[in-house]
Amino acid sequence: MEKYTFPVVLENDEYGYFAMCPALQGCYSQGDTYEEALENIKDAIRLHLEDILESGEAIRKMNSFSLVALEVTARAMPKDFMKWCGYGIYTGKKPL
């Protein structure tokens, strides 16, 4: 058995903790506590890796990764702007 190291992101909200492994697309889990979410994502990663190995694919090892916090400013477009562009209000679809 080979050991792998992957980055894991844990987020806390009003429902508990959400965990994801960005290196493995679609690999995520949750838990009521930080510790439970960590154990659950560990199981999810193991199952994800076993599935990759069973399909004959190679598992890419990560040598390094970084976590960056970015500050982003966004502003809402006025509703009239979307109408002016030819899009239906609230639908986001162009009229026929």
Image (spheres, rainbow, N blue to C red):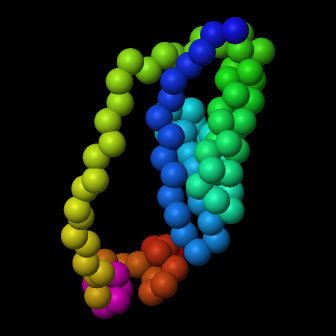
At 44% across and 20% down in the image, what residue appears? 62
Query: Residue 1, located in which quarter of the rendered image?
Result: top right
Asked if one can make out residue 28 in the rendered structure from this viewpoint, the answer is no
- Which residue occupies the extreme front position in the image? 35
Q: Nearer the viewer, residue 40 or 78?
A: 40
Query: Residue 53, located in which quarter of the rendered image?
Result: top right
Q: Residue 55: x and y, percent?
A: 75, 15
Q: Nearer the viewer, residue 36 or 84?
A: 36
Asked if one can make out residue 9 in the rendered structure from this viewpoint, the answer is yes
Q: How many marks?
A: 0
At 50% across and 58% down in the image, what residue appears? 11
Question: In this rendering, is residue 10 above or below 92?
Answer: above
Q: Residue 87: x and y, percent?
A: 41, 78
At 45% across and 87% down in the image, what residue appears? 89
Q: Residue 45: x and y, percent?
A: 65, 32
Q: Which stretch is magenta?
A: 79-84
**43 drawn magenta:** no
Q: Residue 82: x and y, percent?
A: 34, 81
- Which residue occupies the extreme bottom position in the image? 80
**82 drawn magenta:** yes
Q: Is residue 46 found left or right of 3 in the rendered image?
A: right
- Magenta stretch, overall SS: helix
Question: In this rendering, is residue 88 above or below 66?
Answer: below
Q: Is residue 61 found left or right of 59 in the rendered image?
A: left
